Amino acid sequence: MNVLILQGSPRANGNTAWMAEEYRKAAEAAGHKVTLVDVSHKKIAGCMACEYCHGKGNGACVQKDDMQELYPLLAEAEVLVLAAPIYYFTLSAQIQAPIQRIYNMQKPPKVTKMALLASSYSPGVYDGAICEYHGIQSYWGVEDTGIVTAKIDEQKTDATKTKIEKLVAAL
Ligand SMILES: Cc1cc2nc3c(=O)[nH]c(=O)nc-3n(C[C@H](O)[C@H](O)[C@H](O)COP(=O)(O)O)c2cc1C
């Protein structure tokens, strides 16, 4: 399958980047085509709610920032993996902006499956992120292949790597 991973932590050697990379390695080993994008180092603004995309723009977003690189990838993706740290009990702002800019497409047209990778310091802080993830997944009518979370003592461990490999096996 054509897999697109959006990585939303600004820490290049952090836990979320590690989780995204483990997913990429396992998916490539299983024969999938994988694109991993570090959206946290892209210039992607929030949606302006101008409705240009639903009117004159005929699906195109009026904002010409780095989201324009993501739109062709989203148009072809069959699996969308969201990878993000928890900031203040929800997904990081760096991943919220590209998610909300998918407004022009309503849904990435070929996506049939999703997964969530999330990391935090503490336990018990994932409800907001999981609620958002399930909201998007059910709004789009796509399959949830699973969620892997990693709090501080679960980060970069073999146990977390095994959980990520199980998600990939569900593709
Ligand atoms: C702005 C900010 C807000 C955070 N908020 C939370 C939080 O609400 N709950 C929590 O457990 N950790 C919180 N953290 C810690 C990160 O979620 C945690 O360090 C995570 O592993 C970082 O992932 P990374 O290594 O991919 O950057 C926060 C960190 C930052 C920088």
Image (cartoon, helix red, strand yellow):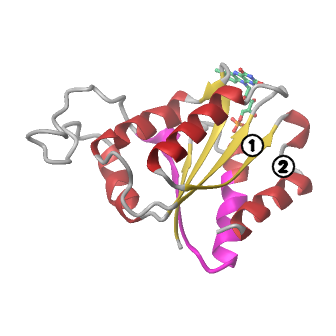
Residue 165 part of the magenta-drawn span: no
Residue 92 falls left or right of residue 14:
left
Tell me the SS state at disc 2. Answer: loop
Q: Residue at x 66, y 35 (%)?
A: 130
The numbered mark at residue 15 is: 1
Q: Are marks 2 and 1 in contact (CB under 8 Å)?
A: yes
Q: Is mark 2 within 8 Å of ligand 1?
A: no
The numbered mark at residue 98 is: none
The vertical placement of 108 against 86, above or below, is below
- Tell which circle, 2 or 1, labels the residue nearer the N-terminal end: 1
Q: Is mark 1 within 8 Å of ligand 1?
A: yes
Q: For the residue carrying disc 2, how many other residues have a C-alpha within 10 Å: few (<14), some (14-19), or many (20+)?
A: some
- Give how far across and how far down residue 83 sits, in percent: 62, 45
Instruction: Look at mark 2 in the image and give the residue it sits on.
Output: 156
Residue 117 falls left or right of residue 106:
right
Q: Residue at x 83, y 35 (%)?
A: 151
- Give how far across and how far down residue 15 sits, in percent: 74, 43
Q: Nearer the viewer, residue 70 or 54?
A: 54
Q: For the residue carrying disc 1, how many other residues have a C-alpha within 10 Å: few (<14), some (14-19), or many (20+)?
A: many
Res 152 → quadrant: top right
Residue 27 falls left or right of residue 157:
left
Q: Residue at x 32, y 30 (%)?
A: 47
The CA span between labels 2 and 1 is: 7 Å
In the rendered image, the quadrant that contains the C terminus is bottom right
Residue 150 falls left or right of residue 140:
right
Residues in magenta? 20-42
